[in-house]
């Protein structure tokens, strides 16, 4: 019997084969899904980090805007920045931690503050608590130049446009790019988002040091550390985005240069000055006289120079032992200490010689005090807002008239009614004698307010040495503190040949007065004219001489003196000059903004129209010209009554050490007496800012 054997296959049935393939497919799918989930998880983390970075960038921009706004709107010192919040007090409490002694650079770095400094520093709060995209508080570094009480003795350096031109007392902050190249070395403040923990940072505890938040990076052989308070910071990419395994960095920062800070600060200052001058005009009736242009880098009145005169001529003085600063010039005041008179400097003839307005009273050996100052000058309608630094006797070179009255009763010396100089045929009759006698017993002498707008030193009237004090003095060569005034006062009855034929003869009286006093009293005002009644404790003397002319010949009737009793003298006709820390905010002069702002006022909007010489009617449209406002060489307004111009920072080609207007202002703004100002687009060749005071809108 034969048996047939068949070959058995190892493969399963078709159904089993399908099940195996499905299992493999499922496994592959699960693997793909797992990888996808992992990739998605990584993508979510990356997106989350990107969102955090974007949040930090937004927060930094808002913090920068708020810091600039705080500085610009500071109530007492625009341009100031707050001290950082440091851990020196054991924690980060959100308040600025100012330093009054023992300053070091570590005091310039800390957290971004939200509260004000504690007394005696600034107490103005900054605002709300700000955190970055990781929930970390922002960090902040500031230049010492912009802080209250910079940790030095003496007053703070001024905050003004001089900071832009090398006038800073301390270094600015430097910010670098990722290659270590300088982006700016004129940084006023840096704001930093610290981000999450990197490297070995440990942020537990109440007040970790800056190094636990801020990062460092090494580029070549140089390490840049944002936490070391060396005023040198770096913008560098997040280490998760760099190819270097050694990088451990995720700081994000934004910065403010001094240039971008001071521009809006200057706008604030111009606005304050415009408002103050407009209020002044509304209250007083006219705008004040201004101070002639001066080099903003010159002395400001706190610095004085004293010495003795060694040589003189009719209108100049010389001190061989002293060099007058180059900044001395038009508008400065020089006091003759020996003779108690004030003079206005015209110009500096040489290093040791000054030319003065008018013929002075200086004698060789007289002591003087020179006051470089921004004082108001009679008739000056273009220039700086007038001011003299606090601590110096404020002197306004503005002329005024005055009135003197006397009543000596019967004590007045009886005139000789038959002067020896009369010929026999010429006598005073009884009426003339009585008239002469009475004129010496009772009388009034009026020195009128000058009608021509000239400095006081050119016409020799009275000068207001501060808001409460007036001195009267001589400006006639050789008169030695006296001034002679000739005026037809009255007529006398004289007898020619016999008293049967009396003739009325006009008498010319010469008054020689010496008023050498200072006092204070009450002030009254009508319109824009101030009347000051000054009390003197010593009598004043007026020398009088009467002359008559008969048949072409002059005869002296009588020469003598009358005494004006001690008491009140009315000094009238002074037009309002500006008062510091009253019409204008105190910071304006403390920070010397008056040096960097130039004003132009139309001729008919000051006390006296400087073109016609008549009192102004406050209408430049009728009594032309007004001030023109131009843009790009085209006049857009011809009705400007008063305008201010801010100098901005130094431009290429300007050299502010020269003191020239052309090195501070541009185009028509740098030209005096042209009644034109330019408002242009800020560019490399123009950065003046213009603010129209009146009429609005600016």
Image (tube, helix red, strand yellow):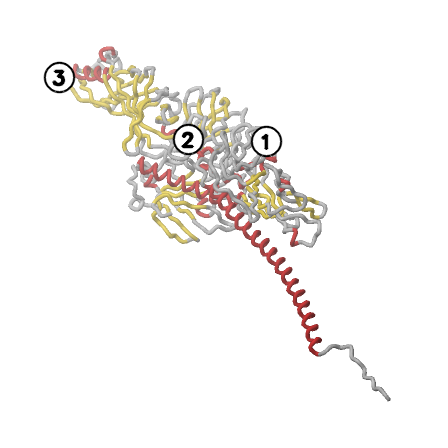
- In the image, 679 versus 396, the foreground residue is 679
Left or right: residue 261 compared with residue 25: left
Give the labeled residue for mark 3.
500
Q: Secondary structure at mark 2?
A: loop
* Label 2 packing within 10 angstroms: few (<14), some (14-19), many (20+): many
Q: Secondary structure at mark 1?
A: loop
Q: What is the x, y in percent for residue 77?
A: 46, 36
**CB atoms at circles 1 and 3 under 8 Å apart?**
no
The answer for how far apart the CA atoms under marks 2 and 3 are is 54 Å
Give the labeled residue for mark 2.
357
- In the image, 171 versus 422, the foreground residue is 171
Q: What is the x, y in percent for residue 507?
A: 23, 22
| Residue 387, quarter of picture | top left
The answer for how far apart the CA atoms under marks 2 and 1 are is 49 Å
Q: What is the x, y in percent for residue 7?
A: 81, 82
Q: What is the x, y in percent for residue 64?
A: 52, 45
Q: Is residue 460 above or below residue 413?
A: below
């Amino acid at each position: 019997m034969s048996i047939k054997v068949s070959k058995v296959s190892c493969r399963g049935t078709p159904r089993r084969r399908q099940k195996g393939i499905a299992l493999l497919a499922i496994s592959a799918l699960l693997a793909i899904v797992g990888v996808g989930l992992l990739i998605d998880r990584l993508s979510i983390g990356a997106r989350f980090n990107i969102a955090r970075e974007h949040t930090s960038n937004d927060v930094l921009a808002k913090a920068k805007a708020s810091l600039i706004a705080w500085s610009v709107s500071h109530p007492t010192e625009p341009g100031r920045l707050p001290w950082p919040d440091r851990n020196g007090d054991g924690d980060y409490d959100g308040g600025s931690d100012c330093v009054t002694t023992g300053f070091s650079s570590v005091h310039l770095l800390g957290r971004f503050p939200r509260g004000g400094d504690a007394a005696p520093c600034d107490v103005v709060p900054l605002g709300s608590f700000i955190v970055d995209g990781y929930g970390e508080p922002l960090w902040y570094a500031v230049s010492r130049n912009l802080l209250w009480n910079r940790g030095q003795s003496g007053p703070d350096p001024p905050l003004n446009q001089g900071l832009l031109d090398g006038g800073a007392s301390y270094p600015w902050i430097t910010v670098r790019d990722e290659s270590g190249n300088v982006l700016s070395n004129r940084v006023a403040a840096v704001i930093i988002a610290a981000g999450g923990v990197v490297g070995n940072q440990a942020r537990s505890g109440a007040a970790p040091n800056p190094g636990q938040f801020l990062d460092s990076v090494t580029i070549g052989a140089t390490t840049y550390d944002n936490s070391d308070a060396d005023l040198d910071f770096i913008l560098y990419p997040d280490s998760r985005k760099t190819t270097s395994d050694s990088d451990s960095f995720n700081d994000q920062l934004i910065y403010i240069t001094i240039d971008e800070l001071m521009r809006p600060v200057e706008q604030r200052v111009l606005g304050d000055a415009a408002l103050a001058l407009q209020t002044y005009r509304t209250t007083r009736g006219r705008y004040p006289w201004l101070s002639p242009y001066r080099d903003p880098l010159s002395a400001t009145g706190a610095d004085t120079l004293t010495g003795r005169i060694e040589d003189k001529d009719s209108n100049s003085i010389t001190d061989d032992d002293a060099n007058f600063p180059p900044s001395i010039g038009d508008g400065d005041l020089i006091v003759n200490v020996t003779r108690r008179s004030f003079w206005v400097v015209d110009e500096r003839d040489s290093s040791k010689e000054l030319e003065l307005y008018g013929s002075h009273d200086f004698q060789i050996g007289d002591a003087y005090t020179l006051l470089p100052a921004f004082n108001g000058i009679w008739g000056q309608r273009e220039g700086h807002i007038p001011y003299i630094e606090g601590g110096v006797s404020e002197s306004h070179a503005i002329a005024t008239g005055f009135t003197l009255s006397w009543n000596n009763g019967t004590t007045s010396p009886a005139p000789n009614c038959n002067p020896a100089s009369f010929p026999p045929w010429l006598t005073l009759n009884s009426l003339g004698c009585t008239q002469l006698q009475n004129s010496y017993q009772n009388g009034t002498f009026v020195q009128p307010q000058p009608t021509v707008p000239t400095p006081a030193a050119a016409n020799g009237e009275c000068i207001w040495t501060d808001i409460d004090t007036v001195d009267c003095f001589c400006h006639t060569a050789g008169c030695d503190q006296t001034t002679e005034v000739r005026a037809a006062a009255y007529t006398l009855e004289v007898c020619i040949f016999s008293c049967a034929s009396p003739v009325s003869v006009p008498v010319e009286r010469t008054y020689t007065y010496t008023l050498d006093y200072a006092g204070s009293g009450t002030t009254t005002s009508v319109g824009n004219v101030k009347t000051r009644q000054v009390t003197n404790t010593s009598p004043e003397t007026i020398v009088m001489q009467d002359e008559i002319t008969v048949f072409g010949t002059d005869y002296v009737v009588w020469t003598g003196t009358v005494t004006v009793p001690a008491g009140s003298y009315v000094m009238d006709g002074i037009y309002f000059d500006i008062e510091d820390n009253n019409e204008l905010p105190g910071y304006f002069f403390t920070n010397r903004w008056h040096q960097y702002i130039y004003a132009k006022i139309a001729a008919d909007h000051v006390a006296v129209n400087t073109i016609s010489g008549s009192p102004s009617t406050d209408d430049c449209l009728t009594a032309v010209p007004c001030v023109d406002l131009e843009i790009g060489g085209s006049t857009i307004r011809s009705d400007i009554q008063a305008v201010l111009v801010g100098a901005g920072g130094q431009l290429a080609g300007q050299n502010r050490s020269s003191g020239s207007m052309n090195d501070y202002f541009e185009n028509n703004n740098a030209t005096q007496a042209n009644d034109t100002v330019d408002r242009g687009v800020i560019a490399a060749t123009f950065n003046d800012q213009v603010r129209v005071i009146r009429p609005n809108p600016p």
